[in-house]
Amino acid sequence: MIAVHGPVLVVILPLFGALVAALVRRPLLAWAVSLIAAIGSFVVAVALLVQVRAEGVVSYRIGGWAPEIGIEYRVDAVNGLILVLVTAIAVLTLVYARRSVLSEIIPERIAWFYAMLMLCLTGLLGMAVTGDAFNVFVFLEISSLSTYVLIALGRDRRALVAAYQYLIVGTIGATFYVIGVGLLYLATGTLNLGLIVERLPEIASPRALIAAEAFIVVGIALKLALFPLHAWLPNAYAYAPSSATVFLASTATKVAVYLLARYIFGVFGVHLGIGSVAIASVLIVLSLAAMFIASAAAVFQNDIKRLLAFSSVAQVGYITLGLALANQSGITGAFLHIVNHALMKGAAFMAVGAIIYRSGTCKLDELSGIGRTMPVTAAALTIAGLGLIGVPGTSGFISKYYLVLGAFEAGFWWVALLIVASSVIAVLYVGRMMEVIWFREPNQRCRGLGEAPAEMLAPMVVLAGMTIWFGLDAELPASLAGAAAHVLLGARP
Amino acid sequence: MRRDLVLRVASKFILPPIMLFALYVQFHGDYGPGGGFQAGVIAAAAIILYGLVNGLARAQKMVPQALLEVLMPSGVLIYAAVGVAGLMTGENYLGYDHLAHDAVHGQEWGVFLVEAGVFLTVFSSMIAIFYAFAGRRRS
Amino acid sequence: MNLITGLMADATNIATIFLMVAGLYVVIARGNMVKKLVGLSLFQSSVYLLYLLPGKILGGSAPILDPKLTVYANPLPHVLILTAIVVGIGTLALGLTLVVRIKEAYGTFEEDEIIARDGAKAGEQGDVA
């Protein structure tokens, strides 16, 4: 069953989870259903990745229709990795979410929360697995619409405004994307990404292609919060319920990055651009700007969730930088960082969620000395923070090492220098958190607090542990990311 | 809310044809323009018209909110389940060929069931949107 | 015939691009959250035109097989745009719902007033970027 129907099972299991969760309406039952569906999806995703590593590409025709007419689901080394990452984060988030959601969302809405979380997972997995340009748009909107609801479920009334602003920006992004796809469709007469590439040489004028590229890249850049299109992200992450933030921060932008990689390597090629300005050079400049400016903004935040959100914008910059370098090491670094950043940010936001669960606040100045009362949580946050800096021994170091390597290979020694320099800013914002958490005397609010409950700690410790494990022994993630890079570089003739 | 006699009587005449037309559009979808989306919206329009004329409370007595909240996921569930039925009969997901004794009838059944699911979801979503906005009071 | 088709193609392109730009302009230029959503809908409807208009073949019939007909309009864009329309409705409904809730929470749906009210409450945001 999995061997043949894996590509579709990985998507419909969470879909069924969402529907049943919406039907049962009982908080605990909805949670259990969602968790089972997510675990099922994870198992299928792992099986798919194993299959892909053995056989190459797994292709699946929805309804048995051939790609020209029907929709093709296509799993290779690139999206196989993304599928495993997203489903794994979903399982851990769900384990973590039960307690956190109980304390943050009113009981009547809890089942809807899980339904929306699973719909969002469905959308993200669908975006990753499908080989049809318009189908990507449909799944993109499924995940986006459920994301807006998830954000609006936050306690603060500012969550509503954050959700509204993200809705406007997200819809513009999705519409830009679909305009680009429309232009590609008009030029080639097909929506299947593989067939589009085959027919590109037949297009007489490159102008349609450039316009399509501009629309698609800007559309996806809005979704992945590429600087300077990131303005929606800090508020969205800051005011969403904790477990929604964990899930979104670790997965949503990553799938968008995957999509960007798919298009710039698989369809357009890195050298296409307007005049002499290729897409790669635009990406390098924007990525560097993100790394510095967003990191600098993070330094001045008092709300830990906002601080980590700005750090996310910066870290996405590293990922897109790796893609823009467009060589084996650079793309390997980018995909390593997709995985590593998902683990680190997942652990960090889980720790912040646990702090909110116990103390009710995530304002840095109210949390002095929280490390003395919640040592495990604070340790997880510390490990994640060290990973964000890129300290040797954490996985963040490995991905930055590959990025620096990629920069040298591409002949941009100054980019390598800037990667190291930007890490110094990360030292500042992580250091600020560490100073408050560990080195200050506990204040009134933090003195009597206990450690977070075990079911919130467990997924946090798993993620933090993997951050260290992948930092010490990077063979598995590096080989997976390397395979993904190999596929992307060989995608166009 | 003021009850306007003309509107109430007129709406009584219009409602049955609207429902009938919805069913026509639903079942004629196999042969001409139509299908679950359009039929669902038309049927929902009948309920919404009833609610506009007779008041929200009466409409909610006819189609309660709780029913809508069951119908919305159920419609998608039917759709997804038809896909799984395809898997069970040895086809790909959403493959209908083996749902009946031959491929043509299988396709017909598959599309029919999928459209029924679409109808339920669209119908209930449209009414739910109407209820959600009409139920709000100006503060 | 050539002249008519040529003019039609131009007119449809111009209509598409006008809707696209006008919608986007409204989204950016208006502070009223409902008007922003109206602009967003305009912007989305330009996409419907972008897909649908080239799919229409002059003199082509509805894409239902019939021995008497040989020229059909391309059905695929219609299916795609039906999906896009549904997505558009969903987005609009969700957006309006959020605006209603925002109005209940803040008493206004002008963006600058909302920012002013939140800023007064928590004046320590310290945004740089």
Image (spheres, coloured by chain):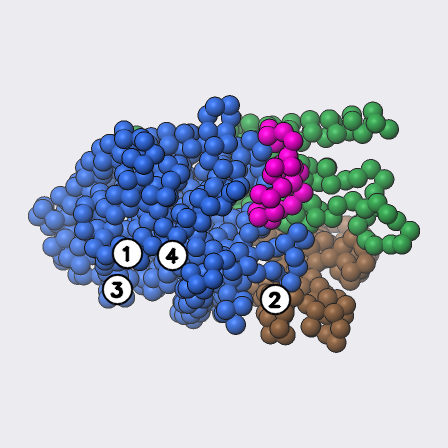
Chain colours: A blue, B brown, C green
Residue located at (25% from left, 43% from top): A401
- Same chain for marks 3 and 1? yes
Q: Which residue is mark 1?
A: A475
Q: In the figure, C81 relative to A287: above or below?
A: below
Q: Please determine if labels 4 and 3 lie on a single subunit.
A: yes
Q: Position of residue A452 (x, y in %)?
A: 22, 61
Task: Write down the chain letter for disc 4.
Answer: A
Cα distance between the residues tagged 2 and 3: 38 Å
Q: Residue A85 shows which numbered tag?
A: 4
- The circle drawn on residue A143 is none
Check if residue A191 falls in the magenta segment.
yes
- Identify the magenta region: A182-208
Query: Which residue is under mark 2?
Result: B92
Using the image, tell me which numbered label, if any, was put on residue A458.
3
Distance (Cα) linking label 1 and label 2 = 36 Å
Q: Earlier in the sequence, mark 4 or mark 3?
A: 4
Residues flagged by tags 1 and 2 on a common chain: no
Q: Chain of mark 2?
A: B
Residue A465 placement, left or right of A100: left
